Image (spheres, grey):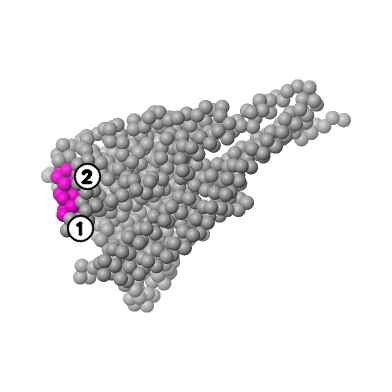
Amino acid sequence: MSNSGPFGDPQTELRAAIRGIQDAVRELHESVVRSVMDRNRAEAAATKIEREIADLDTKAALAEEASHSDVAAELRAERDRRTAELVDARGLASRLAAAAEAAKTGQPAEEARLLQQARELRARFAASAGSTIGGEAGLSEADVLFERARSKTAGLQNEASARAEVAASRGPAPHAAVEQTADQLLAALEARIAGGHMLASTPGPPGASSALPEPGPHSTGEAALDAASQHTWAAAIGRAAAGERAPMDPTQRVRIAAVGTGNIFRSAHLPAYPDIAQAQLVAFCDPDPAAQKAVQKRYHELMEARRKQAEERGDQETVERIERDREAIQVVGDISEVIATIKPDLVDICTQPMLHAPLSIQALEAGINVMCEKPISRSWLESQRLIETVKRTGKLYQHNENWLWDRDWYTAKKLVDSGAIGEPLLMFLATAHGGPEGAGRFWNSDYGGGGALLDNGIHAIGASWYVSGLDKRPTYVKAAEPFGMSIRMPNRILDGRFQQVRVDDDAHILIRFENPETLAWTTAHVEGSWSHRDSPDTVVIGSTGKILFVSEESRRYAVVIDSYDREARRIEVSGPTWQHWPSSFYGEILNMVECVRNDTPSISDATFGAECSAVVGASYLSERDGRRGVSVEEFKQFARGIAEQYPGDPAAADNALVDALLSAVRT
């Protein structure tokens, strides 16, 4: 009696067995790559700690010279702690290097064993069926065993080649033949990465851990990589295949071109650059001749002032650096010139919001890292196209939300994380002033996509998320009574004449941030206003106390108030280094420079910027629907629904979404 059903069919069983061998060979080769990747990450981490130790030594010496012996002692204590960590990091790197070598050494024998199994199966089938194996199992032996590995590698190489064709700043990418064996592909990959810094930590949601895996039976990644990790792995290999460098040499400076040199760049970004030795401004890009002259004048004034200060303290190295940078700076009128002739490592985009996403995408496609002023884009739909480009190109992007490096919020974040007020429950953040009435473009949704909430309230949205904890996500939004999203002062003198306001000049919203795993939540009340402040002053309230900010005698303090309304602690706020001085713009620029130098994602990435934009969109939707609470996901579905009405015309979809949302405040 013959067996019926799939499990009794010898052909089915043998095909399944050969597919199992195919999977085993694929896992074998990918496990070797992952072992090498783990080793490279560990070595990069150890090198980074070494640089940090040297930096702490330098700062301690400077503090001692400045008679700050207490600060010097703290820095040396931190250096000692980091030195102990370095011992562990080197040990881990050594163990992972041994594991990677063992994986590569053992690969040929294991592969030969699997090949022999495949040959035996084919012979058994031929003997029993009298024919060659058909279908998938009937492929040639090499195809059966290497089909998946080859197709994955070919896909990565094709992606890298496409990027290289777009990038005017790079030559054609080397394209290995698809018929290479997995061993050859691995050897070529290791040769390209030249020295082993293939991957930095895998980017994930803001605040995600980047800890290295401990060696063990699963250190080669037996569990399937999630989609984000697979994409990052692919992008990293694509970068290597395209001839792009991995983490930079510690002595190499990041070459930066400024794109858009208006007031925000000249007054906020530009003054930070002379004090960041790791960065070199190589070009100013602006189509406006007047703006070009203004930024050159401001740049030379700043550089001359820093040069004199360096001379006075006998810092000849800084003097020489400033003089070289002043001579090398270039001025161009279009980002295409930046891409074709300047070829920077990073662009600093400070244009009108309508250009944020298009210029960012253009730079990313050309293989250039990007940091861009807030808001991330004019419409949330635009931000999704930007995120897709970041993923596809594998380049780094920072949403420049400077409040994450602001001394108030940086200090508050450290206090909250230390448990100074228990669990954070509620916060009020007010960003309010009378309005940018001298700048008509701020009031035109064609340029900005919105009004006060998208312009200055976006700061408070990002900061409230940051302090709440980036393990949480914005989930629900409500336009808050009694003002909600509105036009409070509708008749204003804009560009010298009375005009009707057509964007929100006042916004009061509630945001719920939730941890998807623990379901813990924090509520924030945000005011973004061009019609002066109505909400309570800024405060962070926890389960055992609160944090407020006070200014006394030209000093700024974060004050912890306990549950009995007593002052429990008073800390002078400081920026993201041991010095008191650095501004939030200095902090965000330095952060991105170091991210580029270490090939690691910024804490304020494109997803962070897009989620903040989604909160703004949900706020309009809440106002439009009678100020009911709406989920952020509901807004996203609303936006996608509008996009579906304009297939193949993303610009029209962007305009339609902006108009639909602003209808909530226009009468």
Q: Which residue is mark 2?
A: 324
| x, y percent for residue 83 | 44, 62
Q: Which residue is mark 1?
A: 314
Quadrant in the picture for residue 292:
top left
- Quadrant that contains the N terminus: top right
Q: Is residue 568 above or below residue 144?
A: below
Badge 1 crowding class, 10 Å Cα cut-off, few under 14, some 14 to 19, many 20 or more, is: few
Q: Is residue 271 visible?
A: no
- Quadrant that contains the C terminus: top left
Quadrant in the picture for residue 226:
top right
Q: Is residue 21 above or below residue 468?
A: above
Question: Along the line of sight, which residue is nearer the eye, 458 or 131?
Answer: 131
Disc 1 residue type (three-letter): Gly
Q: Is residue 248 above or below residue 405?
A: above
| x, y percent for residue 157 | 48, 32
Q: Is residue 79 visible?
A: yes
Badge 2 crowding class, 10 Å Cα cut-off, few under 14, some 14 to 19, many 20 or more, is: few
Residue in the picture at 66% in, 28% down:
141
Question: Along the line of sight, which residue is nearer the eye, 535 or 67?
Answer: 67
SS under mark 1: loop
Boundaries of the magenta span: 294-308
